Amino acid sequence: MAGTGARERAEGRGGAARVDTRDVVLAAVRLFTDDGFEATTMEGIAAATGVSRRSLFRRFGSKEDILFAEHDELFSTVVRYLEASPDDPLDSVCAAARLVLQGYLRDPEITVPRYRLVRAHPRLRDREVAMTARYQAAFTRYLAADRGEGHSLVAGVVAASLIAAHNHVLRSWLRAPDQDPGRVWERFDTATDLVRRTAATVLEGEGRGRTPAGEEPAEPEPPAGESVLVAVYPSDTGRDELLRRITAAVRGPRATS
Amino acid sequence: MAGTGARERAEGRGGAARVDTRDVVLAAVRLFTDDGFEATTMEGIAAATGVSRRSLFRRFGSKEDILFAEHDELFSTVVRYLEASPDDPLDSVCAAARLVLQGYLRDPEITVPRYRLVRAHPRLRDREVAMTARYQAAFTRYLAADRGEGHSLVAGVVAASLIAAHNHVLRSWLRAPDQDPGRVWERFDTATDLVRRTAATVLEGEGRGRTPAGEEPAEPEPPAGESVLVAVYPSDTGRDELLRRITAAVRGPRATS
DNA sequence: CCATACACCGGCACGCGGTGCCACAAGCCG
DNA sequence: CGGCTTGTGGCACCGCGTGCCGGTGTATGG
């Protein structure tokens, strides 16, 4: 629980300090798992969080979107990371996939119950696969942009392989979230190695990967069990706000395996 | 339009010869493209087809499901084909993918406008990718069932590759449905060949080929003007030390935007 | 100090998707 | 004929999602 409890005071009228998004999500997840997703109404979530029904829709869009709010944030983070990544494209997308897995491992409090909900309700399942499709599309675009335009097939296949490998590892963790994270990263490395091998096969005969001019080729892949922190913020974020959020994130209960 | 018009007589009560599913779908597609998906109400479809609103929900489940009714049928067909297929598993799934593409090419009257609708509405897009995910899951299960249980990763990657290749060719047709079908099949063959090559690579090299990743943690430098901060630190770095270093980095001269 | 502008919130009403329930019409059987 | 099953239409109802409005806190300018 990150900073709950002190919020309940925000009742009454206008002023009403904005309830933290994460608290809303956690409360909603709790209601979903306790009462069932269908049975939980937006009015119920509103009552439980102190945010009005109308504002819930304004901030999250829909009931499902509450469940995937954190995931959406992660997605945009990954996309921005990808856009700013100077490494070899294949390394970049692998690192991006690592980022996604890390996003899941970071707060099991949301991702694990969400996984259970997703498994139970086909509609939520569709929403989940839609998310992975968005990742896949982003990876494909990124890989295809680097090479010539004619290689979108190859890019699509490589991206699909990587997503499949990632999801394979991810699910293995979601089914047993208490296992040693080191094992998870180990599996992730073998999975990405597999993808790399297939990609190498597929790319044979293509021009070799570009080398960014100058600069030492930064090591893109932290060794397994490494601690990675990636922060992506809007360009207009003030330094203080940035530091405050990073501090809060680091001080948070979850250490990245 | 195919076989409408003679239906209008089915008013009044019970008897009402059952309106053909395909006619309902075609009418709905027409309404969707003419008036927009959101603007088209189930009551409108009911009025246009002579089927009551209640029966529409009973037969199709939801408004979206009307659009994908034919696709669902195709899916179950493919699954049954797969279950009865005695060939080499890789050949079987490739043939199954061919079946799907054929299902699209067979009636452009539904698939083409549906593609346009899917492109326009994110919600329908999600539904579409959910369908491809179902195919992918079916292919994965089929491929994994053949080999030992430990190869579900490989199966998943191969299935994902095949689906990606199929979708690549499919979209190229959907964007220009009037082109020569021979070209489409030609592209399909080259795409499946690509998948076959990668699959061969992946299936042959079951020996571990893991390369030990480098050890040196690094701080990749985001391009100037970008709002990305990536920091990689040893796992045992203390929170305070981490924060101090991040603070120094952000406060420093090369602050991120 | 007040006026204006802006952004966010909560309440209300409403359309529509989706479901449970019931009545009714056919086909099939003894 | 009377029961059973199956599919249908009508009706009422719930809940999601949205447009609209009034109110409140904060920032900006005279």
Image (tube, coloured by chain):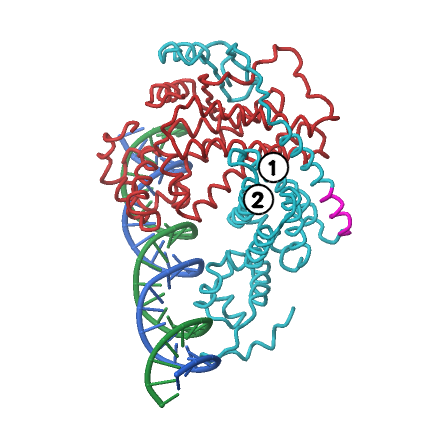
Chain colours: A red, B cyan, C blue, D green
Quadrant location of the N terminus of chain B?
bottom right
Of the numbered discs 1 and 2, the one sitting upstream in the chain is 2
Task: For mark 1, give the secondary structure.
Answer: helix
Task: For mark 2, give the secondary structure.
Answer: helix
- From the viewer's perspective, is B245 left or right of B163? left
Front residue of B162 and B239: B162
Q: Is residue B53 visible?
A: yes
Which of the 4 image quadrants contains residue B57?
bottom left
- From the viewer's perspective, is B5 left or right of D27? right
Is residue B50 inside the magenta stretch? no
Is residue B184 inside the magenta stretch? yes
Read off the magenta span: B180-189
Residue A212 position, x and y percent, is: 65, 16
Residue A123 position, x and y percent, is: 44, 48
- From the viewer's perspective, is A93 left or right of C5? right
Q: Chain of mark 2?
A: B
Q: Main secondary structure of the magenta part?
A: helix
Dot 2 crowding, Cα within 10 Å, few <14, some 14–19, many 20+ = many
Front residue of B21 and B139: B139
B233 relative to B137, above or below: above
Residue annotated with mark 2: B139
Residue kind at label 2, given as amino acid type? Phe
Residue annotated with mark 1: B158
- From the viewer's perspective, is B241 left or right of B130? left
